[in-house]
Image (spheres, rainbow, N blue to C red):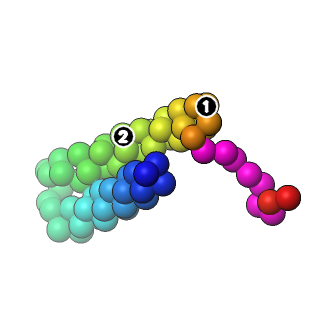
Amino acid sequence: MLKLLIVAVLFAIVASLGSGLFFLLRDGSDSRRMVNALTVRIGLSVALFVLLLVAWATGMIQPHGIVPA
């Protein structure tokens, strides 16, 4: 369930980045929609980082090396 949540947040981050690009290309210079989309992306990225730290601290996920033993 946690992995599904992580993937969903990653999709939301990519969607927010895409909407920021769309607003950059289509809106005029006085629009704040691009800034809002990128602010949402930053908030989602920080939330994902905190989620990963909490999941690691509680033992829900375990880090491993590139080549597992």
- The amino acid type, in three-letter code, at marker 1 is Ala
Q: Residue at x 37, y 56 (%)?
A: 8
Judge whether residue 48 is colored magenta.
no
- Can you identify the residue that label 2 sits on? 43
Q: Is residue 37 above or below residue 49?
A: below
For image coordinates 36% across by 40% down, the residue present is 43
Residue at the right extreme, as displayed: 69
- Please report the residue visible at 45 percent of the width from the left and 43 percent of the height from the top: 48
Q: CA distance from mark 2 to mark 1?
A: 21 Å
Residue 57 falls in image quadrant = top right
Magenta region, residue range: 61-67
Residue 64 picture location, percent across and down: 74, 52
In the image, is residue 62 part of the stretch drawn in magenta? yes
What residue did someone put label 1 on?
Answer: 57
Mark number, residue 67:
none
Q: Secondary structure at mark 2?
A: helix
Disc 2 residue type (three-letter): Gly
**Is there any visible trace of residue 35 in the rendered image?**
no
Label 1: which secondary element: helix
Q: Is residue 27 above or below residue 58?
A: below
Q: Crowding near pointer 1: few (<14 within 10 Å), some, many (20+)? A: few
Image coords of residue 31 (percent x, y): 14, 51
Q: Earlier in the sequence, mark 2 or mark 1?
A: 2
